[in-house]
Image (spheres, rainbow, N blue to C red):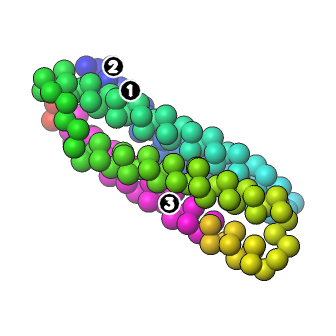
Amino acid sequence: MWALRTAMLLALIVWIGGIIFFAFVLAPTLFTVLPSPQMAGDVVSPALSKLHCIGLVSGAVFLICCLLYDRIRYARFRLFTTANLLIVVMLILTAISQFSITPRMRELRSSNMNSASAHAEFDSLHAWSTRLEGTVLVLGLVVVVVTARRLGNSS
């Protein structure tokens, strides 16, 4: 059981910690230190894709560990727990960002955004990307609290 609890917590730490580092340290620093927004974007874009991959794997690990934990502890799978449902929403939002928004932003960036409409579309997509990432972060923090309470009650 301790291994499942450890894996659950590690998955959350990696995912949520990565989002916090990316949003509050990496991206702002790059846009401040590098000589052009284009160069900063050249670093931020692949870093964000890697963060999304980490999130997708971490979310899957968390769900699998939760299901196994419930199977061992309660002799049944409990699919619709608060934490599981929130993680599924987080995974969906991360997938939307990774497979829909990010590729379109990359496409616009590679076209050098010569037109005002391309700039406007990029800004809109960036706003959506930021909203989705912020929502994933907030939901993840809720999952941390729910999981801490749950594991605290299981001792």
Amino acid bearing label 2: Ala
Q: How many marks?
A: 3
Nearest to the eye among marks 1 and 3: give it: 3
Q: Residue at x 55, y 66 (%)?
A: 128
Label pair 2/1, CB-CB below 8 angstroms = yes
Residue that mark 3 sits on: 132
Q: CA distance from mark 3 to mark 2?
A: 31 Å
Which disc number belongs to residue 3? 2
Which one is nearer the viewer's eye here, 122 or 145?
Answer: 122
Q: Quadrant of the C terminus?
A: top left
- Secondary structure of residue under mark 3: helix
**Residue range corresponding to the magenta coloring:** 126-151
Q: Name the spot of residue 105 as percent of width and height, x first.
A: 69, 60
Q: Name the spot of residue 12 as percent of width and height, x first.
A: 41, 39
Q: CA distance from mark 1 to mark 3?
A: 25 Å
Q: Residue at x 19, y 24 (%)?
A: 71
The crowding category of the residue bearing disc 3, from other C-alpha atoms within 10 Å (few below 14, some 14 to 19, many at least 20), is some
Visible residue check, residue 34: no
Which one is nearer the viewer's eye here, 49 or 30?
Answer: 49
Q: CA distance from mark 2 to mark 1?
A: 6 Å
Q: Along the horizontal axis of the image, is 49 left or right of 60?
A: right
Label pair 1/3, CB-CB below 8 angstroms = no
Visible residue check, residue 133: yes
Q: Residue 79's image quarter?
A: top left
